[in-house]
Amino acid sequence: MARGNHTTVTEFVLMGFTDRPELQLPLFVVFLVIYLITLVGNLGMILLIKVDSRLHTPMYYFLSHLAFIDLCYSSSIGPQMLQNLLMKKKTISFSGCFAQLYFSSAFATTECFLLATMAYDRYMAICNPLIYPAIMTQWVCKELVIGVYTYGFLNSLIQTVLTFQLSFCDSNIIHHFYCADPPLLALSCSDTRNKEKQLLIFSAVNLTGSLLTVLISYICILFSIIKIQSSQGKCKAFSTCASHLTVVIIFYGTLFFMYLRQPNAGNSWKYNKVVSVFYSLVIPMLNPLIYSLRNTEVKDTLKKMIEGKESH
């Protein structure tokens, strides 16, 4: 079989979410609404944190980066999918497919480790409140964020290059709505066993490594909350991490289902498409809603901004 960079494929055909023409327009409207809500919600979250000095804390600094990552992650997939729902020719260039795989994987991996960093921040705030300001300084927060971005993008670069070193010399039809590793590997006429093993190992390490940090942090938080005497103090401590915990459960649950479950030959692509829509489009839309609805400080800032505009 052909190996390495030798390939006759110059573009790929994205089959999209469905091949039924009557569903194309309704799906376009639904996904367009989801994408617009994602844009408004995450841009709004970034703006709120920027304009209100009360939100210039480590927790909201990380939250602003979570909003930025969700915005970029959704934008690496959403526009192409929306375009293909309206176009008869649902193609993407070879370089465009490379870029989409690279950026979508990079932002997904970065979000995993940013959520772990946010869990560590909550652990420090609740379990070590006296030394928290001295430990989680502005410089430390920036270093942590730079670290997760660097790892996420480097990890994605390695995986994307390994994928596109394979040969694609037969079919160029991707049974998905964006360029992702599993459907691309199914198209390759090279021996993909090594790449599949590497993908599984990297995915497992990234997911379990970051999730382990989250679990350890929240176990320590739980024990600290139990030690608090007053019920009011317990509720206050739990409320500071309830939004993050909700986001973690949704995000990691869908990713574990997507990458670590055993594929089932018949309907595996259909299930993968549904899960992919959820974590690439729905979760980025939900995150700012979860944080704004469950966070008093964010709601107060938003209320003040709205009242300020009305008074003018």
Image (cartoon, rainbow, N blue to C red):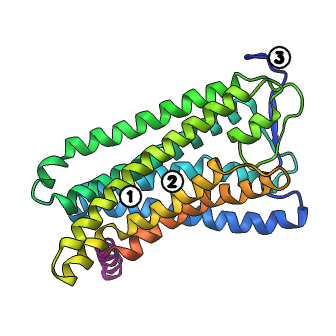
Picture coordinates of residue 127, whole percent (x, y): 20, 60
Asked if residue 65 can be seen in this view, the reply is: no
Please name the residue that numbered disc 1 is placed on. 46
Please name the residue that numbered disc 3 is placed on. 2
Residue occupying image coordinates x 74% and y 30%: 94
Judged left or right of residue 198, residue 183 is right
The answer to whether marks 1 and 2 mark residues whose Cβ atoms lie closer than 8 Å is: yes
In the rendered image, residue 299 lying in the magenta stretch gets the answer: yes
Picture coordinates of residue 172, whole percent (x, y): 85, 35
Q: Secondary structure at mark 1?
A: helix
Magenta residue span: 296-312
Q: Which comes before the other along the chain, label 1 or label 2?
A: 1
The kind of residue tagged 1 is Ile
Asked if residue 233 can be seen in this view, the reply is: yes
Residue occupying image coordinates x 80% and y 56%: 86
Q: Which comes before the other along the chain, label 1 or label 3?
A: 3
Is 142 or 24 nearer to us in this picture? 142
Please name the residue that numbered disc 2 is placed on. 71
Is 12 or 136 nearer to us in this picture? 136
In the rendered image, residue 176 lying in the magenta stretch gets the answer: no
Residue occupying image coordinates x 33% and y 66%: 241
